[in-house]
Image (cartoon, helix red, strand yellow):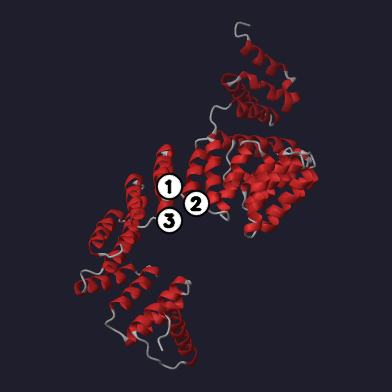
Amino acid sequence: MQIPPNEHNNFSLSRFESMLKTNSVLFFDSEEFEDIIQHYLENGKIALAKKATKLGLEQHPTSTNLKLFQVEMYIFENKLDIADQLLDELHVLEQSNEEIYIQKANILSRRDKHKDAIRLLEQALEVTNDESDVLSLIGMEYLFLEDFENAKYFFMKCLEEDEEDYSALYNIIYCFEYLEQHEAAIDYLNDFLNKNPYCEVAWHQVGKQYYFLKDYKKALAAFDFAIISDDRFIGAYLEKGKVLEKLKQYKEAIESYSITLGLDDPTSFALLRIGKCYEKLGDPELALQFYSKCVEEDALLDKGWIAITDYYIKNKNYKKALYYIDKALNIDSENVLYWKRYAKINTRLKLYEEAEHGFRRTLELGNYELETWLMRCDILIQLGEYEAAVKNLFQASEFYPENAEIEFRLAGLYYFLTEDRKAEFHLKNGLKFDPEFSMIIEELFPTVYLRNSVKEIIKKHKNPSV
């Protein structure tokens, strides 16, 4: 009785794993070893794939395919020189084996020699029976080179070979998008749809191009066609929801997002957008319910925590806002968006030491917006940390030179530190850059503003003839 292929593969795999457990030695033909290795590679079991390759070569030392698997292991371990040497040996024996060219190209690609890799893949193209795979690899090399026109050309050739190669289709559209050729992408997709009118992926991509072009009605029609083609296509419902939001049709957007919740496990994106729609519809309780579900579904999605926090900030419930941003920071203490909100909330609550810590962390994490430097300075002034405030402002001035808001603050601080010459220098700078901001002296340093010498400098700037 002949064993069906799948059952035969499962039988070989069971025998192999039994052999490993018992330390006995069983014989397998080379094709069985190839199937076993392929199974382990596809399932990410690299150690077992290596073991099978080693045992396979012990039983079949001349098998080219097993040696090619060995090359794959070496490449995976970044032992590129050994892999390259083994490929050279195989090339002498089999000059028409496409896999040898493909693996040599893989090594060159890893060494960032993409043009050389393309030349080898073109040689593989001459000897292969499966042009689609090689064309795709050439396309990827052109992507690495950021040569999007050539990449697009080769992915198009892939799609001509196999109209169901949606990976190639996505790559083609990626190239169009990178080149900002949205109208050309629509034309290409329409030509493709003329031959494949029920291709949900193509309709979905047409919709995305119209979305980029802000033609929301045509985008909506395209996503509807994608759903007609496949009524379980989650991506189309999500994109349709986004378009309906743009059209301010929030109830319909909620309906579209909600369909996805019944098709598969809920996505944090859909839950977040439903919450946003309910907030726009003026239903805060339902909005908060969905924001909470969003962070339960994916605690690492910062947009969920930010949505809850911002909701409470908007409603001036700063204690609740602080509670949620603290929870978010416990999950991800390196998120600059969390720290900025933490700092602002604590400022509102007049918890100045915590606010200063928040602004400092925001800067340490690379948020160099002028507002962050200025707000930290103002908090340091509240805390009486004048020298730290000066240091903070000089750091800010490296990013924002000749800035009046920085200069007026420096002037006030130097007056506080009784360094009047430096204070006058920065006061005059501030007046030179933008005199409108002189009110900073009045607001942040009222005692300084009352000084006759300060009033005289400001007055003199406004009326040079006096």
Q: In this view, does 400 lie above or below 327?
A: above
Residue 352 visible, this angle: no
Q: Mark 2 points at which residue?
A: 200
The C terminus, quarter of image: top right
Q: Which amino acid is tagged 3?
A: Ser
Q: Which residue lies furthest to the top in this view?
A: 465
Position of residue 326 measured from the top left corner of the image (x, y, whole percent): 73, 52
Q: Is residue 434 above or below residue 345?
A: above
Residue 320 visible, this angle: yes
Residue density around tag 3, few if under 14, some if 14–19, many if 20 or more, within 10 Å: few
- The residues bearing labels 2 and 1 have C-alpha atoms spaced at a distance of 9 Å
Instruction: Residue at 67% x, 36% y: name it.
Output: 375
In-image side of 199 versus 100 (left or right) = right
In-image side of 379 versus 50 (left or right) = right
Of callouts 3 and 1, the N-terminal one: 3
Q: Which amino acid is tagged 1?
A: Leu
Residue density around tag 1, few if under 14, some if 14–19, many if 20 or more, within 10 Å: some
* Mark 2: secondary structure: helix
CB atoms of marks 3 and 1 within 8 Å: no
Q: Name the residue under label 3.
A: 167
Q: Which amino acid is tagged 2?
A: Glu
Q: Name the residue under label 1.
A: 193
Instruction: Residue at 65% x, 16% y: name it.
Output: 457
Instruction: Residue at 59% x, 47% y: name it.
Output: 364
CB atoms of marks 2 and 1 within 8 Å: no
Position of residue 439 measured from the top left corner of the image (x, y, whole percent): 69, 22
CB atoms of marks 3 and 2 within 8 Å: no
Of callouts 3 and 2, the N-terminal one: 3
* Mark 1: secondary structure: helix
Q: In this view, does 296 lie above or below 46?
A: above
